[in-house]
Image (tube, helix red, strand yellow):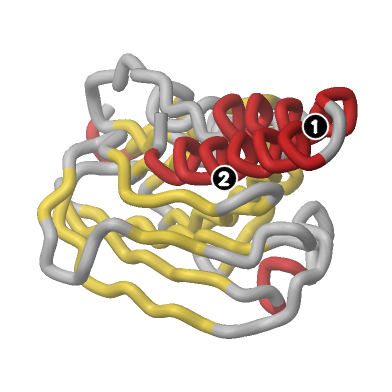
Amino acid sequence: MVKYGIYYAVAMLVGAATVTYFGSWPFAIPFYLLAAFCLYFFRDPNRRIPDGPVCVSPADGRVVAVKPEDSGSRISIFLNIFDVHVNRTPIPGRISDIKYQTGRFVVASKEEASSENEQNTITVEGVGTRVVFKQIAGLIARRIICYKKAGDQVAAGERIGLIKFGSRVDVFLGPEWEVVVHAGERVSAGSSILARRRDTA
């Protein structure tokens, strides 16, 4: 459980208690439902991280695009409000750069969200390669959280932050990666393999 879920749930329960005290308990039901949703939304399950020269998904959700990008590929993952929103690093290595960009709040499933929305771009370098991925805010999500800073060492599948409520994560891979997912597939952060290294086969 991410701590933010507890904070929100407690706030909703305080609201429920206040409404019950000054009014009637049936009017407090929406607050109890919102408290339960917050605990569900901010869940943080453990994941089994696969071994080998692979790039794992940094987010839970549905792959909405797999497209060529420069000399490599871009994989876009859309997270709805029922997905786990904890983000994980796709490869082990060192975070060489983190760049935050203000922006719009276009629906995260749309293509323009990749370039126009508020986003946090993280570059990880390690095991002879570099992977860039973006935490992208959506229509509802307006808070991107990153636990790490440039220079930090990270393991594959390590928790690096979260995006509150519906959002998107884009992953940029170089030509040394063979993408093994397709648009429409569902993936899980840390455990689903997005790509495999060509040069280590």
Q: Quadrant of the N terminus?
A: top left
Q: Quadrant of the C terminus?
A: top left
Identify residue type, mark 2.
Ala
Q: Which residue is the site of mark 1?
A: 28
Distance between the Cα atoms at labels 1 and 2? 13 Å
Q: Considering the numbered disc 1 on the image, is that residue within a helix, a strand or a loop?
A: helix
- The answer to which image quadrant residue 89 occupies is top left
Question: Could you tell whether 63 is left or right of 102 in the image?
Answer: right
| Residue at left offset 67%, top offset 67% | 114
Residue 111, given in percent of the width and then of the height, sits at 79, 63
- Label 2 neighbourhood size at 10 Å, few (<14), some (14-19), many (20+)? some
Most distant residue in the front direction: 22
- Label 1 neighbourhood size at 10 Å, few (<14), some (14-19), many (20+)? some
Question: Could you tell whether 169 is left or right of 127 in the image?
Answer: right
| Residue at left offset 64%, top offset 32% | 35
Q: Considering the numbered disc 2 on the image, is that residue within a helix, a strand or a loop?
A: helix
- The image shows a total of numbered marks equal to 2
Question: Could you tell whether 132 is left or right of 41 in the image?
Answer: left
- The answer to which image quadrant residue 60 occupies is top right
Question: Could you tell whether 5 is left or right of 165 in the image?
Answer: left
